[in-house]
Amino acid sequence: MKKVLITGAAGFIGSHLCDRFIKEGWYVIGVDNFLSGNPENLEHLSSNQNFEFIERDIITGLNYAGHLDLILHFACPASPVDYLNFPIETLMVDSVGTSHVLNLAKEKKSRYIFASTSEVYGDPQIHPQPESYRGNVNPVGPRSVYDEAKRFSEALSMAYYREYGLDVRIVRIFNTYGPRMKLEDGRVVPNFIFQALKGMDLTVYGDGSQTRSFCYVDDLVEGIVLVAEQEEIDYRVLNLGNPDEYKIIDFAQIIIEKTGSNSKIIFKPLPRDDPKMRKPDITKAVECLQWKPEISLDEGIRRTIEFFQSEIEDHEIEDQD
C-alpha cells in the first residue's frame, strides 16, 4: 500500500487531504502539534485502519520508521490571527521544520509537495499573478513572518531539488475556504460568515475595493492530488486557486444575502501591507493538470454556511452546559 505523510494534518486543508488520500486507497500518517490545528478535524479517522497519527512539533525533528512514497508539508499557521500570534513558531516551522521534512523525504526517496501560498507575491504589481512573478513583499513588515517563511521554504525545497535530485513540487495556494475553518479564523470568509450568522456588523478593511478570489477546499484538494500523483512533470511551482475575482465590499453583500442576515457593513483601516489585488493565473495548472475549479461560489458558500451554523450551535450548547 502506498504511504503518504502529511504535516499539519489537523489543519483545515491538511485534514481534508487526509480524507482524500485515504479515499484514494493510501495509508496516511498525519503529523501535527495542534498549535493551530484542531484535533476535532481528525476525530472521525481515529479508528480508521489506514490512518496513523503522530503528535509532534516538527521544529524538533521528524522521523518515520517505514517507507514513504509521498510527503505533503502543510504544517504552518496560515491565518493572520495565528501567524501574528505565533510569529516565531511560524518562521521556525517553515525554516527548521522544512529542513527536517526535506531530510526525511531525501532519506526515504519520497516525492515531496510543499504548501506555499499566494502571499509570496505580496502586494502584487502584476495582475493576475503568474508563477513567474517574483512578488512585492515587505521583508520586515508584520506579515513577513508568514510571507518570508514561505519564500524561504520554497528556496530551500528547490535547493534540495538541485543538489540531491529530490522530486520537489511547490503549490502556491490562493484563498481557500470551506468546512473545518475555525470560527474566528481571521480570514475574510469565516469572518464574514461568523459575523453575519451572529447578527454582528461585517468588518471591511479599507474601502472594500481590494479584490480576492475564493477556491472551495474540494477543488483545491483535487488539484493537490493531481500534482502528487502525476509521474512526469515539466514544472516545479504551480498556482492553485479560483480565478474568479470579487471586490471585498461585494463579497460582504453576498454573505449578508446568503445568510439572510440583517448585519450592516462597517469600515476599519486597512492593515499594513494588505494586498490590493489577489487573483491566480492558473494557465499552467490547466495545461499541466487539466485542472480548474468546478464548485461555484454559490454552492461552496452554501456548504460553508451550513458548517458554521452547526459549529455555532454546538458552541452555544457547550456554553449552556
Image (cartoon, grey):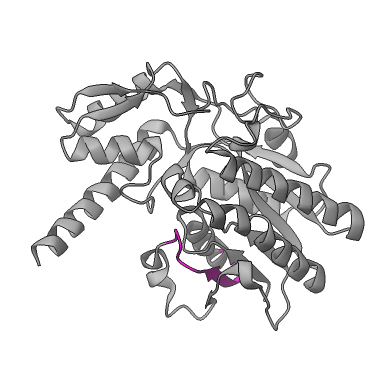
Residue in view at x 37 percent, y 16 percent:
207
**Which residue appears farthest toward the front when viewing the image?**
140
Q: Position of residue 36 (x, y in %)?
A: 44, 58
> Which image quarter is the C terminus in?
bottom left
Above or below for 278 versus 82:
above
- Quadrant position of residue 96: bottom right
What count of labels does the image hold? 0
Kindly identify the residue that appears in the image at 80 percent across and 42 percent down.
235
Q: Is residue 36 left or right of residue 52?
A: left
The answer to which quarter of the image holds residue 247 is top left
State the residue at coordinates (59%, 25%).
123
Task: Using the image as rendered, state which of residue 61 and residue 307 is in the foreground.
Answer: 61
Q: Does 21 appear in magenta?
A: no
Image quadrant in which you'd find residue 287: top right
- Taking depth in this image into account, of 230 and 7 the one nearest to the observer is 7
245 vs 270, nearest the viewer: 270
The residue located at (81%, 67%) in the rendering is 106
Specify the quadrant that holds the N terminus: bottom right
Stretch of the chain drawn in magenta: 24-37
Q: Is residue 60 above or below residue 302?
A: below
